[in-house]
Amino acid sequence: MTAGPSTGGGGGNGRALPWLYGRAKLPMLRARYQLPDLRAAVERFGAHYLPGTPTTALIAAGATSTGPTEHGGPPDYATGYFGVEWEWWQRVANDAETRSILGREGPATYAGFDRDVEAQAFAGMRTYARHLVMVRAQLAARGLSELARGDAAWAYRLAVAGYSAGPGTVVNTIRGALADQTATGATWRELAAAVDHLCPNCAGHVGAVPCCGRWKAADVVIRCDGRWEAGRYLAGEVAIPELRFYEAGAIASLEEQAVARRLTSRVNGV
């Protein structure tokens, strides 16, 4: 196995990124990647729902889940490897899309879902794609048509952030921070810098979105960065060619690291 990317996330200083959970999640994500059934299902449904996104990134999208038998509480009852919203899944477990793409009816009970890795991967990838569609539609409706498109790396960011914070919060954060532009993975660093500028303290807002706290403007950026860095570390160990996906958008320079530290302090309300 080849060593992963620098623990400093770039900049050549070799220091860890203590404000991101990406590296801490590496052993868990490596173990998931090495499950043949899970990896094959993520590859299959990821190619359908988020084409151009490497498997390491898709597996890392579930970094906050404890595993296949996780059953979260209200309001979303996040379930399984990818934190699927349980009430939504029960509504779609036997709909036309599930029967067509999964190829069968999905399990609608916790006991069945816990054991069904293929259905969990399908439900997870469909969930991210569903949030991506909502974010894109809202961006386009607000006149941000270029930001509604973007490359695969930008789409992954929108999908993961939309799932985590909700499409409306993500769209309003982007709308308050960026002008419409061609979007790539590197655009996320522009978003981070803009949010940092607009959030000198917890009295600030990015557009209508407060700066501080969970699922607010700073968290939209940094929580997504945690998954991005987790996937990058994972690719560095198990899928070196996939590292190219992460180059534009990684926290690389010393200034980018400083921005990430400040945004993390805002997530924590400091």
Image (cartoon, helix red, strand yellow):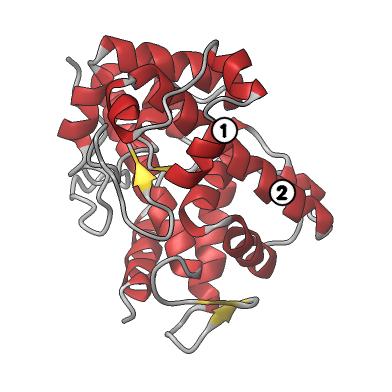
Describe residue 17's horizontal placement relative to residue 188 as left or right.
Answer: left
Q: Given contact means CB atoms under 8 Å apart, are the residues at marks 2 and 1 in contact? A: no
Q: Which residue is mark 1?
A: 92
Describe residue 87's horizontal placement relative to residue 73 as left or right.
Answer: right
Q: Quadrant of the N terminus?
A: top left
Which x, y percent locates residue 164? 46, 53
Q: Nearer the viewer, residue 145 or 255?
A: 145
- Identity of the residue drawn at 58% across and 59% down: 170
Which x, y percent locates residue 3? 19, 24
Disc sitting over residue 147 in the figure? 2
Q: Is 132 situated above or below 98?
A: below
Q: Nearer the viewer, residue 177 or 159?
A: 159
Of labels 2 and 1, earlier in sequence is: 1
Q: Quadrant of the C terminus?
A: bottom left
Q: Nearer the viewer, residue 106 or 227?
A: 106
Describe residue 234's horizontal placement relative to residue 165 as left or right.
Answer: left
Which x, y percent locates residue 202? 43, 85
Describe residue 5's horizontal placement relative to residue 106 as left or right.
Answer: left
Q: Amino acid at mark 1?
A: Val
Q: Quadrant of residue 58?
A: top left
Q: Amino acid at mark 2?
A: Leu
Q: Taking the image as drawn, is residue 191 in sight?
A: yes
Which x, y percent locates residue 99? 59, 16
Judged from the image, the secondary structure of the residue bearing numbered disc 2 is helix
Label 2 neighbour load within 10 Å: few <14, some 14-19, many 20+: many
- Identity of the residue drawn at 24% across and 24% down: 32
What is the CA distance from the residue labelled 2 to the residue labelled 1? 29 Å
- Identity of the residue drawn at 55% across and 51% down: 162
Mark nearest the camera among 2 and 1 is 1
Q: Quadrant of residue 119?
A: top left
Judged from the image, the secondary structure of the residue bearing numbered disc 1 is helix
Q: Taking the image as drawn, is residue 184 in sight?
A: no
